[in-house]
């Protein structure tokens, strides 16, 4: 009966209730938008990092991590790859040779990280072939192909299809060099990093560096599901106790940092918006109670007890949320789904987003639990908001109330 | 010829070129071989000065150098006072550096190879880069030219695909009379000159004739110049491979 | 006119509860927007201060060629007079001249590249608090004859221990040879792994000896007393150092990616703020609506007894304005308390986050900036919202039908 009464009360003054409900719905919608947008931004950053830099898991010789010397290789590469082939969580695997050396042209030399990659697996794993801005990927039909960034090319004064010489320390400490032909420019968007890395083929680097067969410096792994990273990591660690096996968060702590930072500011935003809603509801409900002093006095005079009166006001506050929360969630959901199709293009007002390791198109997204969290938070907010006005209502003195105009 | 020519000055293994006279020797290759024969010696000892000119300063370095064949060289710095006693040992493609002030021998890593050797316009890499003028390039004879009154063969060298060479091409001016290499130009792959080496001051040393002054001029840095001059040089001295050891690097004194 | 003022104050005083509720809704709006912006800005400034102190300074003096070619040959001498002039600028807190260069370090048979920072120990300490990073050995002083501090990553890579002699080998100033050997006096841990794997600090006179670069610096970091309005500081410093043929850069031009990150963050904060404005506007509007509903009868009576609608409009508008003023002022005071508290007593964000932040040399804490401009700007924004909302009662009165109003 009280529910009925509360429900009717809400609709007796549609403008007032409408404002409260609109405020709540708008608040939820806005909150979802911010959360979805931020999540999209974080995911964009993490995805770009995983794709271009860290993969899900990387394997190294334990000393290579801090001391990337050419001698610190993973031995028995074939065995390692074989073991991984049998693990169904693993989607792609790509071995790499990595050495630091000198890339020189007629006009000078630059220190660079030389990455020897298998063109086929690398194309699948890091989509390196998509990063080719001009010219060809490494899978051209000739020996000693190299991809460098156009920035590095400018420093070296070389153009497409011209040559550079790579010199680096071979396994026995001797310096070896080879002449490479530039097959294309690559560009991951992060010029500073791109200018310091050159890509050649695994086989070519192995030949020129006289490196042992069946070894590599790095194995990059992507999984079918990002959530199985720690499980796979443990499995690999038990197979290869003498290798350093690291997840993307260990490789790149800035990912965790970024995640945490966004979480903090999201928390602040949620709290602030909930507070704003809370005060909005309290104020409106309080007004509503005061406005109806006479009516409440009447209800008490005809025998409604204080507890029921308290419950009635609480229910009004809660019921309004029951109407507005689903509406807000639905609105938010539609907005996020709609925006995630085409994404929000930020390139116009944040030109350097890619420098920062993000895509300029952000696709908002929101995990399902967030919907429940918002709903629960709002129910709590509405209950808290209802308490003070309800107490006020409960304390109405019927005799005085009836005397008022 | 090429920077190895200069390196030879430091390490004095003057142009030990593959002595495989093949049937298919072209006229151009024959001229180069002749020019190399002119300055080639199996072993040598010389004293040099290197002058590094920059827009805002000039530095002089004096040194003494021993060399044996293509692979061994030892250079001792004799001036300025601060660097006196510093020595470099080259064995194949590796270079060690002896520093008397700290009593240590240090092996030069590849990352340092791109820096100018002793601050000059030549990188260490230029000096030890092992490419063969004869085997790593294709040679074309161009019409002869007159350079400062000297009639010269002009030869263009284009690198073979496999050779670890940074140049787009090299052009050399070799005098017709005495086969001295008066000028070399080094091009990038856009065929722009990036470095010029000018030889001058021919002198008779024993039965050989040599150019005793060389200037290196990088095109992209106007006002920069490195000049090598040698005071004395002696060929075919008696010196063994053991001389070019790490122990001797520490012991060597003027 | 005076009568209307009088009535407005009377009405406000008469129904204090209503006044309180309306004012409170505006107070919350002011308080939330001010604190929120101050916190967001404060967190950024905190991080920025950290990065700027550790890496570039707010403004940095360099030779003109150093930006494109950061080598020793682009180092410079600067007169004590110019340094004093810079220090005398009102907004300059402290300066830290450094000589920075790449070099090779060797121990036994291992050789690794490293960055050497030649610093004045006491200046470096006062700007970057370097001694906090010392994990073993002794910190250096200006007089130390061999006070080398090596980062722990480099120590591991070289297999060094405290007291071992580290060999330096590379190119010095103007093509001279940089050679030296000193025992490791202290080991430091630096935040970023990349830095920790290759950094060495030494007193400036040792660096001068090593690189043959006597009295030379590659940069002078200038720390400002605050990080707002750097452009005037920048041009002041520029004026001083231009006479010596030097350049001055702001951190923005030296770390464009950080500036970019800041702008992205500011943009997303702005979106958040708009949404917050929307929510508080709803809150205020709801209260306003209630107030008008409650008073429809009263307004109907006033019009019936001959009050002009314009007078009534003015009355209601004045009342709302006074309530808004009360609300805004109290909102500002409460925000000021929150902001001052967070500014002087930052709230730590927990150990988990501290672990993550530590890798970047930062402290995970909730803090706020004390910037009067934020107070003014946010108050102004809320005032605009209130002004727009105050049009509603005017419209409402314009449409009011006194007969219906009295009957309702």
Image: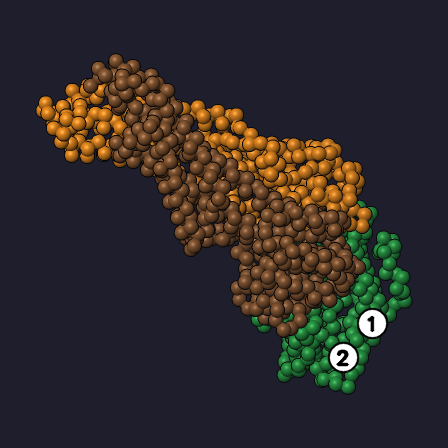
Query: Residue most toward the top?
Result: A399
The image quadrant of residue B125 is bottom right
Q: Is residue A175 visible?
A: no
Count of numbered marks: 2
Q: Nearer the viewer, residue A125 or B18?
A: A125
CA distance separating discs 2 and 1: 13 Å
Chain A colour is: brown
Q: Residues within 10 Å of mark 2 (few under 14, many from 20)?
A: some
Label 2 element class:
helix
Disc 2: host chain: B
Residue located at (70% from left, 72% from top): B163
**Label 2, on which residue?**
B34
Which image quadrant for residue A293? top left
Whether residue A210 is visible, yes or no, is: yes
Q: Is residue A254 left or right of residue C250?
A: right
Q: Nearer the viewer, residue C65 or A333?
A: A333
Q: Is residue A97 above or below residue C20?
A: below
Specify the quadrant that holds the C terminus of chain A. top left
Residue at image point 72% right, 81% down: B29
**Any idea which chain is the green one in this picture?**
B
**Where C49 falls versus C298 (above or below)?**
below
Expressed as whole percent of the image width and height from the top left, the position of residue A373 reads: 47, 37
Please provide percent x and percent y for residue C223.
Answer: 53, 36
Whether callout 2 and callout 1 share a subunit is answered: yes
Q: Residue at horizontal 74%, vertical 48%?
A: A238
In the image, taking residue C303 as reference, residue A156 lies left or right, namely: right
Chain in orange? C
Q: Which mark is residue B41?
A: 1
Point out residue C99 in the picture as x, y percentages from the top left corner.
63, 43
Q: Mark 2 or mark 1: name the one nearer the start of the chain.
A: 2
């Amino acid at each position: 009966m009280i529910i009925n009464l509360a429900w009717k009360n809400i609709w007796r003054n549609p403008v007032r209730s409408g404002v409260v409900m609109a405020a709540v719905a708008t608040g939820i919608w806005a909150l979802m938008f911010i959360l979805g947008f931020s999540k999209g931004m974080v995911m964009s950053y993490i995805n770009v990092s995983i794709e271009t830099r860290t993969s899900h898991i990387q394997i190294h010789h334990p000393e290579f991590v801090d001391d990337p010397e050419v001698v610190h290789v993973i031995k028995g590469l074939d065995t390692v790859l074989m073991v991984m082939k049998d693990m169904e969580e693993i989607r792609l695997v790509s071995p790499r040779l990595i050495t630091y050396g000198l890339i020189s042209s007629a006009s000078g030399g630059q220190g660079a990280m030389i990455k020897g990659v298998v063109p086929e697996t690398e194309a699948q794993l890091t989509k390196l072939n998509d990063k080719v801005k001009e010219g060809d990927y490494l899978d051209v039909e000739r020996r000693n192909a190299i991809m460098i960034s156009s920035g590095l090319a400018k420093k070296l004064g070389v153009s497409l299809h011209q040559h550079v010489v790579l010199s680096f320390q071979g396994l026995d400490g001797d310096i070896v060099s080879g002449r490479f032909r530039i097959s294309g420019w690559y560009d991951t968007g992060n010029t500073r990093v791109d200018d310091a890395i050159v890509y050649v083929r695994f086989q070519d680097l192995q030949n020129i560096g006289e490196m042992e067969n069946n070894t590599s410096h790095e194995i990059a792994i992507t999984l079918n599901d990002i959530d199985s990273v720690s499980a796979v990591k443990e499995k690999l660690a038990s197979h290869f106790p003498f290798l350093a096996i690291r997840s993307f968060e260990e490789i790149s702590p800035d990912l965790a940092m970024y995640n945490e930072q966004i979480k903090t500011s999201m928390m602040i935003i949620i709290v602030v918006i909930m507070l704003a809603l809370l005060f909005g509801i309290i104020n409106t409900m309080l007004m509503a109670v005061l406005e109806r002093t006479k009516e409440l006095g009447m209800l008490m005079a005809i025998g409604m007890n204080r507890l029921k009166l308290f419950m009635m006001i609480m229910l009004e506050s809660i019921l309004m949320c029951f109407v507005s929360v689903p509406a807000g969630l639905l609105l938010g959901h539609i907005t996020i789904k709609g925006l995630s199709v085409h994404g929000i293009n930020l390139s116009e007002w944040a030109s350097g987003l890619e420098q920062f390791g993000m895509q300029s198109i952000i696709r908002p997204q929101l995990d399902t639990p967030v919907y429940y969290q918002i709903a629960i938070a709002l129910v709590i907010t509405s209950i808290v908001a209802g308490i003070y006005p309800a107490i006020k209502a409960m304390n109405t003195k019927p005799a005085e109330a009836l005397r008022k105009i | 010829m090429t920077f190895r020519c200069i390196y030879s000055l430091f390490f004095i293994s003057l142009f030990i070129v593959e002595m495989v006279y093949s049937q298919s020797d072209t006229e151009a290759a024959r001229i180069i071989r002749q020019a190399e024969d002119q300055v080639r010696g199996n072993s040598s000892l010389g004293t040099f000065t290197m002058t590094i000119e920059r827009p805002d300063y000039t530095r002089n370095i004096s040194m003494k150098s021993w060399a044996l064949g293509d692979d061994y060289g030892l250079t001792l710095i004799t001036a300025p006072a601060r660097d006196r006693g510093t020595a470099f040992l080259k064995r194949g493609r590796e270079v060690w550096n002896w520093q008397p002030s700290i009593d240590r021998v240090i092996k030069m890593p590849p990352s340092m190879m791109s820096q100018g050797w002793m601050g000059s316009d030549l990188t260490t890499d230029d000096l030890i880069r092992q490419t063969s003028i004869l085997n790593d390039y294709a040679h074309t004879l161009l019409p002869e030219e007159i350079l400062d009154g000297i009639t010269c063969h002009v030869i263009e060298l284009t690198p073979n695909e496999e050779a670890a060479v940074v140049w787009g091409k090299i052009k050399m001016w070799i005098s017709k009379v005495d086969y001295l290499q008066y000028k070399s130009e080094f091009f990038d792959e856009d065929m722009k000159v990036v470095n010029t080496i000018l030889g001058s001051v021919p002198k008779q040393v024993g039965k050989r004739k040599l150019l005793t002054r060389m200037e290196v001029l990088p095109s992209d840095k106007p006002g920069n110049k490195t000049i090598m001059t040698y005071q004395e040089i002696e060929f075919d001295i008696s010196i063994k491979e053991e001389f070019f050891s790490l122990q001797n690097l520490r012991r060597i004194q003027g | 006119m005076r009568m209307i003022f009088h009535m407005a104050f009377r009405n406000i005083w008469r129904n204090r509860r209503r006044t309180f509720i309306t004012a409170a809704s505006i107070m919350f709006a002011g308080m939330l927007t001010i604190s929120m912006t101050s916190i967001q800005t404060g967190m950024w400034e905190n991080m920025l201060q950290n990065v700027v102190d550790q890496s570039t300074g707010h403004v940095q003096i360099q030779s003109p060629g150093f930006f494109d070619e950061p080598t020793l040959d682009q180092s410079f001498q600067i007169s004590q007079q110019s340094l004093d002039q810079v220090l005398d600028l009102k907004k300059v807190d402290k300066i830290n001249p450094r000589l920075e260069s790449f070099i090779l370090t060797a121990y036994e048979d291992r050789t690794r590249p490293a960055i050497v920072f030649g610093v004045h120990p006491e200046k470096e300490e006062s700007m970057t608090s370097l001694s906090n990073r010392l994990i073993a050995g002794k910190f250096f002083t200006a007089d130390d004859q061999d006070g080398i501090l090596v980062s722990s990553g480099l120590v591991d890579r070289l297999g060094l221990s405290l007291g071992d002699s580290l060999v330096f080998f590379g190119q010095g100033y103007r093509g001279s040879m940089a050679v030296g050997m000193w025992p490791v006096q202290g080991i430091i841990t630096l935040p970023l792994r990349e830095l920790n794997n290759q950094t060495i600090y030494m007193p400036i006179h040792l660096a001068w000896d090593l690189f043959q670069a006597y009295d030379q610096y590659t940069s002078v970091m200038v720390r400002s007393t605050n990080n707002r309005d750097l452009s005037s500081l920048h041009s002041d410093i520029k004026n001083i150092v231009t006479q010596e043929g030097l350049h001055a850069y702001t951190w923005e031009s030296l770390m464009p990616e950080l500036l970019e990150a800041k702008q992205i963050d500011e943009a997303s904060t702005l979106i958040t703020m708009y949404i917050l404005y929307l929510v508080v506007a709803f809150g205020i509007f709801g209260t306003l609506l209630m107030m008008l509903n409650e008073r429809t009868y009263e307004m109907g009576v006033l019009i019936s007894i001959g009050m002009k609608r314009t007078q009534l409009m003015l009355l209601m508008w004045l009342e709302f304005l006074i309530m808004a003023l009360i609300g805004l002022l109290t909102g500002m005071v409460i925000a000021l308390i929150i902001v001052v508290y967070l500014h002087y007593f930052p709230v730590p964000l927990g150990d988990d986050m501290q672990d993550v932040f530590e890798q970047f040399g930062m402290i995970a804490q909730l803090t706020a900036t004390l910037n009067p401009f934020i107070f003014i700007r946010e108050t102004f924004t809320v005032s605009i919202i209130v002004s727009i909302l105050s049009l509603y009662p005017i419209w409402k009165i314009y449409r009011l039908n006194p007969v219906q109003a009295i009957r309702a």
